[in-house]
Image (cartoon, grey):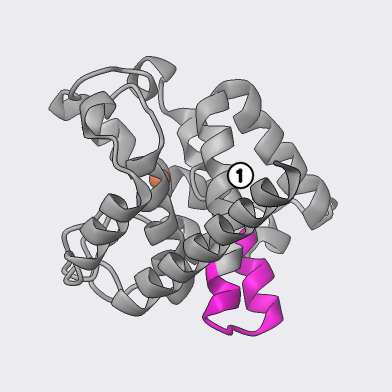
Amino acid sequence: MEVYNYNEYYLIKHLITSLKHYHYTTYLHSIRVAKLTYLVSKKLELPKDEQIYNCKGGLLHDIGKVLVPVTILDKAGSLTELEYEFVKIHPTYGSEMLKIFPSLKDLVPGVLYHHERLDGSGYPFGVSIIPLSAQIIGICDSFDAMTTRRPYNEKRLRNIQEAIFELKTQSQKYNYKIVEALEEVLWEKKEKQQRFISIYR
Ligand SMILES: [Fe+2]
C-alpha cells in the first residue's frame, strides 16, 4: 500500500510528533542527532541536498521505536535477550513505516542501516557495506547515546573527549573521517559557546 496524498513536510512533522508523544527522550535524542548529522554532512562538504536529506534521516532514524514497548525503552540495567531482539528490530520497523510514503522513500537507507557497523557487527543485517547517510547518522547517534544521560548508561556516561576517543579507537566499526568531522563540529560549537559566554559575562 502506498499513500500519495501527503506532502513530505506534513509527513515528517506528523511522524516526529508521534514520536514526541510516545517517547519524549527518543524525540529529543532525534532532534540532537538530526542537528549533528546536518553539521557533519556540511563539514564533509557533501552537496547541499544531501546535507538536508541526511538531516531528515537523522530526525526519523529512530521512528521505529514507536513500536518498541516503553518499558523496554526506559529499562534501567541490561535488557534480556528477548527485549534486545525487540530493540534490534526498530530500524526495520522504521524503514517499513517510511516505505509506505513515496516522498519519504529516499530516507529509508539512513534509517534501515544506522545500527550497522563497518566490521559487520551491527544490526539488523550485520552487513559491512553501509550507505554514507547511515554511517553519518550512526556515528552521531552513538555519540549522543554516549554523552547523554539515559536509564541504562548511568555509570558509563562520557564527556565529549572520551566519546570521541572511543569512536576513534573503534575505527574498524566507525568511519574515521566522519568521526574527525564530528570532532571538528563539536569543537567549533564549543568555541562559539565560549565566545558567547565571554561576551555576556
Ligand atoms: Fe536507533
Along the viewing direction, whichever of 87 and 101 lies nearer the viewer: 87
What secondary structure is found at the residue carrying circle 1?
A: helix
Residue 52 inside the magenta-drawn segment: yes
Outermost residue toward the front? Answer: 201
Few, some or many residues within 10 Å of mark 1 (<14, 14–19, 20+):
some
At x 57%, y 35%, the residue is: 28
Q: Amino acid at mark 1?
A: Ile
Coordinates of residue 77 in the picture (x, y in percent): 20, 20
Outermost residue toward the top? Answer: 71
The residue to which callout 1 is attached is 31
Residue 114 figure quarter: bottom left
Q: Residue 28: in sight, yes or no? A: yes
Q: Name the image quarter holding the C terminus.
A: top right
Q: Ligand 1 is found in which quarter of the picture?
A: top left
Tell me if 110 is positioned left or right of 50 in this view: left
At x 41%, y 66%, the residue is: 183
The segment highlighted magenta reads 40-55
Tell me if 33 is positioned left or right of 79 in this view: right
Tell me if 67 is positioned left or right of 188 in this view: left
Coordinates of residue 172 in the picture (x, y in percent): 16, 71
Along the viewing direction, whichever of 104 and 52 lies nearer the viewer: 52
Tell me if 66 is positioned left or right of 89 in this view: right
At x 57%, y 25%, the residue is: 24
Along the viewing direction, whichever of 64 and 179 lies nearer the viewer: 179
Coordinates of residue 140 in the picture (x, y in percent): 44, 56
Coordinates of residue 124 in the picture (x, y in percent): 28, 53
Q: Residue 113: in sight, yes or no? A: no
- Please name the predominant secondary structure of the magenta segment in the image: helix
At x 39%, y 68%, the residue is: 135
